[in-house]
Image: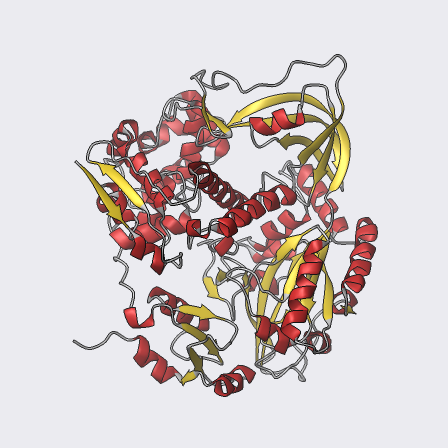
């Protein structure tokens, strides 16, 4: 039985072009999903899906694990390619695209905190044209008025938001997903350079944003201590700062050499300020450690270029890592006029430095097998110091890149590192003598010897349930913190258990026993008992964690949560059709096909049947439908709300189909205000926008009586 489904309305609701027509075909047996989107080649759709999967993965490595696999510049290339394709084919844009998101969901080890207003990312590039485009955009918005810029060093640290109430530090949070961060108040209070109280001249409520960073010299001393104690050193100062902030014991944070670089007074408009430069002066007067570098000003691209050049040439002499400059419009009124995109403000950009480069020799080229079976070529290098970090390996992304570079064993290459651990190989500058044979994709998997298959630009081992590398990756992902969070079942332990034959698949995790584990090296009765306890605790996982833990291609944490809220039970998800999956906000044809194909696979189905005899995913409350009368309406919040935080109010609006914005314009439908409302309220009155106090807002969003 074959039938055709048209899902135009779903895509209209998601913000796509109204003339989009997608045809999905299903068969009752194989459940094959195909799509024909007018004018868009299949290769483009596949590339967009690949880019999203890669970027979500690298976001997880960077924000969650503090252990990135690729350089900043390599990440930027992937991100910019996705942006370009989405601009060229806007029909392919989905709400869960990385281009529409900021950071990552906060870790559940810390209490979630809603930000005063969203902590967005910055548009960034190391090319001069970013300044030209930005300056032109600002001049157009300024409409003849004087333009001034703040130019600040882009400190490579961890973004935080600090809230002072009655001049005392009451709350501190990480960026998280941009809307909700991790409560790290106790850890921030343990940092000696962060004031716990402000001077009497400070207002009652002060919201500050800044970077927590680790000075270069402090980073070196910390790593020396870790190595002396036989502990793994941090890869770079940014990772060290992030790891130090995420300690459950504030005493550990207090022992680390951390400092604060404040760069913004977030509630400036509520306090009546007109320019951020004035805010920064007052922040310093109130007791915050605002350095002179945070207050440099300019009026033209030439001014910005001069400051950028100065930092670039002196970066190795600075006591902190810096990878560019941040350029911001100084006028708060002009910022409000310019507004923001989904994930970046229009009134600020990051003008980055060219990555650091060095020359070294390729000692070996290998192919690594990842969790999904993808083979990644890796160059093992003669160790070389690149900007204070010793580099000995470089990911080559795919075999097409190896061919493009014509990279071979023994070649002398130029590598670059842009603030992270794994660099890029930029070019071969001297071929090896004699020249070795080209490094070609292996015909068989280097781990399990299965025949390798080509999928676009990538090569994969298809032996999902028999390849030890994929089994290892699958178990590691399943037991990770954001999945079933089986504490104690880490990389080394999984390797040991696989070598000993104690585990062979996900279901076998639940056959482990204390008497089998205790005799192993590195274990004892207590550690074995703790691991078994963590495994037992995972037998009734939250539905979205279980779904994410299965490692379905293209299904990240947010998508797993959205699907779980929509269907409510794992059984309903497992039998969902492509048409039903497309009803979930943010799920497009590519993701739907991935899910349908995953559950239709006979080996997957057999493994799931075994796993579900051991595990009982807990049902979720099915997500409430959108409110038609609020769909597409834009809300702006100002002042303080008593019933819930501003972030909670924004999410409530979005759950009902509306939009929440931090900037006001003629397109705003509602202004919700509370005590302490500032200049936004007056501007809303001038624009004739409908005003709601908290009581009226609650009445608007409450369910209508039957």
**Residue 383 % position (x, y):** 73, 29
Residue 193: tell me if it is visible. Answer: no
Q: Nearer the viewer, residue 381 or 459?
A: 459
- Res 674 seen here: yes
- Residue 323: percent from the left, percent from the top? 71, 51
Q: Quadrant of residue 487?
A: top left
The tally of labels here is 0
Q: Position of residue 449 (x, y in %)?
A: 45, 15
Q: Is residue 174 above or below residue 672?
A: above
The residue that appears at 24% across and 46% down in the rendered structure is 5
Residue in the image at 79% along x and 58% along y: 305
Q: Nearer the viewer, residue 239 or 47?
A: 47
Query: Which residue sits furthest top?
Result: 434
In the drawing, does residue 634 fall left or right of residue 128?
A: left
User: Horizontal and vertical percent for residue 546?
Assistant: 33, 44
User: As drawn, is 315 to the left or to the right of 664?
Assistant: right
The answer to whether residue 52 is above or below residue 322 is above
Question: Where does the N terminus fall, quadrant-wise?
Answer: top left
**Residue 539: which quarter of the image?**
top left
In this picture, residue 107 sits left or right of residue 696: right
Residue drawn at x 64%, y 66% as measured from the top left: 137
């Amino acid at each position: 039985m074959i039938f055709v489904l048209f899902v135009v309305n779903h895509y209209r609701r998601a913000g796509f072009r109204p003339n989009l027509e997608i045809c999905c075909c299903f068969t009752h047996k194989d459940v094959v999903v195909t799509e024909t989107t007018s004018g868009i080649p299949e290769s483009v759709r596949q590339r967009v899906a690949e880019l999203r999967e890669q970027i979500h993965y690298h976001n997880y490595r960077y924000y969650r694990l503090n252990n990135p696999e690729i350089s900043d510049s390599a990440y930027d290339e992937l991100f910019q390619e996705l942006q370009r394709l989405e601009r060229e084919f806007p029909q392919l844009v989905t709400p869960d695209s990385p281009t529409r998101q900021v950071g990552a969901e906060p870790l559940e080890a810390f209490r979630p905190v809603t930000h005063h207003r969203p902590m967005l990312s910055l548009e960034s590039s190391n090319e001069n044209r970013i300044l030209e485009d930005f300056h032109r955009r600002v001049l157009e918005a300024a409409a003849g008025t004087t333009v001034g810029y703040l130019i600040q060093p882009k400190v490579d640290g961890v973004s935080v938001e600090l809230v002072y109430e009655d001049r005392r530090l009451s709350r501190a949070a990480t960026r998280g997903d941009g809307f909700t961060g991790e409560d790290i108040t106790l850890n921030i209070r343990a940092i000696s350079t962060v004031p716990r109280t402000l001077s009497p001249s400070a207002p009652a409520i002060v919201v500050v944003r800044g970077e927590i960073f680790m000075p270069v010299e402090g980073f070196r001393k910390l790593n020396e201590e870790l190595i002396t104690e036989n502990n793994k050193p941090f890869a770079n100062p940014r990772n060290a700062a992030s790891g130090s902030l995420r300690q459950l014991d504030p005493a550990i944070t207090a022992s680390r050499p951390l400092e604060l670089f404040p760069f913004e007074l977030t509630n400036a408009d509520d306090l009546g300020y007109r320019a951020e430069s004035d805010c920064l002066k007052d922040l310093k007067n109130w007791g915050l450690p605002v350095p002179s570098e945070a207050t440099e000003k300019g009026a033209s691209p030439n001014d910005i270029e001069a400051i950028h050049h100065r930092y670039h040439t002196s970066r190795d002499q600075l006591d902190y890592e810096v990878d560019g400059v941040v350029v911001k419009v100084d006028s708060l009124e002009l910022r409000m006029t310019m507004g923001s995109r989904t994930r970046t403000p229009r009134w600020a950009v990051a003008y980055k430095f060219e990555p650091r480069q060095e020359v070294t020799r390729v000692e070996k080229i290998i192919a690594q097998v990842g969790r999904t079976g993808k083979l990644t070529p890796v160059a093992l290098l003669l160790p070389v110091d690149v900007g204070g970090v010793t580099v000995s390996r470089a990911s080559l992304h795919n075999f097409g890149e190896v061919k493009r570079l014509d990279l071979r064993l023994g070649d002398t290459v130029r590598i670059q590192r842009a603030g992270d651990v794994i660099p890029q190989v930029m070019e071969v500058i001297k071929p090896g003598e004699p020249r070795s044979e080209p490094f070609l994709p292996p015909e068989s998997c280097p781990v399990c010897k299965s025949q390798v298959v080509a999928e676009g630009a990538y090569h994969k081992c298809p032996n999902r349930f028999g390849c030890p590398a994929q089994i290892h990756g699958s178990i590691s992902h399943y037991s990770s913190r954001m999945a079933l969070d089986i504490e104690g079942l880490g990389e080394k332990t999984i390797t040991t258990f696989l070598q000993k034959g104690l585990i062979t698949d996900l279901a076998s995790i639940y056959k482990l026993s204390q008497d089998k584990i205790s005799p192993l090296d590195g274990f004892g009765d207590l550690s074995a008992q703790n691991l078994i306890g963590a495994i037992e605790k995972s037998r009734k996982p939250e539905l979205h964690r279980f779904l994410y833990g299965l490692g379905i291609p293209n299904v990240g944490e947010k998508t797993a949560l959205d699907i779980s809220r929509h269907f409510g039970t794992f059984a309903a998800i497992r039998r969902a059709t492509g048409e039903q999956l497309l009803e979930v906000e943010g799920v497009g044809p590519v993701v739907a096909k991935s899910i349908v194909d995953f559950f239709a696979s006979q080996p997957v189905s057999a493994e799931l049947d075994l796993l579900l005899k051991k595990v009982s995913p807990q049902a979720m409350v099915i997500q409430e439908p959108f409110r038609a009368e609020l769909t597409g309406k834009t809300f702006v919040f100002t002042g303080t709300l008593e019933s819930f935080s501003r972030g909670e109010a924004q999410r409530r609006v979005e759950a009902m189909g509306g939009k929440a914005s931090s900037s006001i314009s003629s397109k705003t439908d509602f202004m919700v205000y509370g005590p302490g409302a500032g200049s936004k309220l007056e501007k809303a009155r001038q624009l004739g926008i409908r005003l709601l106090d908290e009581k009226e807002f609650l009445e608007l969003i409450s369910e209508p009586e039957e």
